[in-house]
Image (spheres, grey):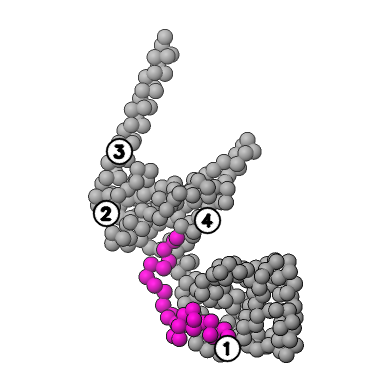
Amino acid sequence: MLIPAIIAAVTSLAGAAAGCVLLGQAVLRRMVGGEYSIRIPPSVEVRRNRTGLTTGRFRMGYPAWASAKTGRPRVVHHPTVIIIGGWRLSAADPFEAYGLVTAMRDAGHELALCPEEQRKLNSLTERARWRASATGVARIMETFRDHPADFRVFCADLFHTLGWRVRPADHGTGLDLVRPDGAAYVAACEFRPRVDRAPIQRLREASSAARARGMMVVTVGRYSRAAAEYAERAGIELVDGDGLMELCRRAWGLIPSPSVPDGAARLTRGDIMSRIPAGLRGRYRNENL
């Protein structure tokens, strides 16, 4: 009789302790919410900030697969951690956590860019600089002279702005494009002053493998006569430097802005989802920011 009584007493104490923890967390969430004029979701854990840092900052965390001793993978939830003032907040759900970050910022509280946001801002700033160069063929040539591989990224940004769906292709300098009307294209982006027949012929071979409806070559320069004749026979659309400038004007206007809009570095649902393993994304299908 003694052992069951001990077990019952321990269980009762454990339950009481758990209840105290839940009550304590509810009180802390209310305190933080009142201090920053926001709602703290019940799933967020609140602790005192003992890092010595008072400037608002955060680090995103995402679920991941981890090997278990049984050999079967298990899910590990790396929490997002937010440090602001005297508080440390953590949440397992990255969407809920980033929603909390957004609420804090919208309420006027400063939180430094996390690494993902900083990388996004750097990329957007670079693309804005590229767009600003799109006022003439010579400026585009100068912009990509030292990094010709970036010309494909520039072309991807251009077609995306024009409403095409874009993704890098497996063939060299290529892009897989889908026009707004649904027609699929394969494209080659050739950063060179003169394009001969060889890259156009390679594009045709890639198009046969991809079963694309259309083919296109984009360059900042010109095409040789042999290249132009071959493209005409093969039904390949050629965009030279002048044609490229026309597309740039349609996408970004006569004088593209070199600035990045405020808030452009904020993460989107797609940004966060891309960092979650494919096999776990279904669990977050209904999550919104």
Label 2: few (<14), some or many (≥20) within 10 Å?
some
Residue 40 pos. (x, y %): 32, 48
- Residue at mark 2: 36
Helix, strand or loop at disc 4?
A: loop
Please state, as top left, top right, bottom left or bottom right, where the N terminus lies in the image: top left
Callout 1: 10 Å neighbours few (<14), some, many (20+)?
A: some
Which residue is under mark 3? Answer: 24
Magenta highlight range: 242-268
Query: How far is disc 4 from disc 1 in space, using C-alphas?
Result: 39 Å
Query: Is residue 48 or residue 218 the one in the foreground?
Result: 218
Q: Nearer the viewer, mark 1 or mark 3?
A: 1
Find out whether the residues at labels 4 and 2 contact each other: C-beta distance under 8 Å.
Answer: no
First reached walking from the N terminus: tag 2 or tag 3: 3
Give 264 or 21, whichever is nearer the viewer: 264
Q: Secondary structure at mark 2?
A: helix
Is label 4 or label 2 in front? Answer: 4
Q: CA distance from mark 2 to mark 3?
A: 19 Å
Q: Nearer the viewer, mark 4 or mark 3?
A: 4
Secondary structure type for disc 1: helix
How many angstroms separate mark 1 from mark 2 (CA)?
54 Å
Of labels 4 and 2, earlier in sequence is 2
Instruction: Say left or right for 240 vs 246.
Output: right
Q: In the picture, which quadrant includes the C terminus?
A: bottom left
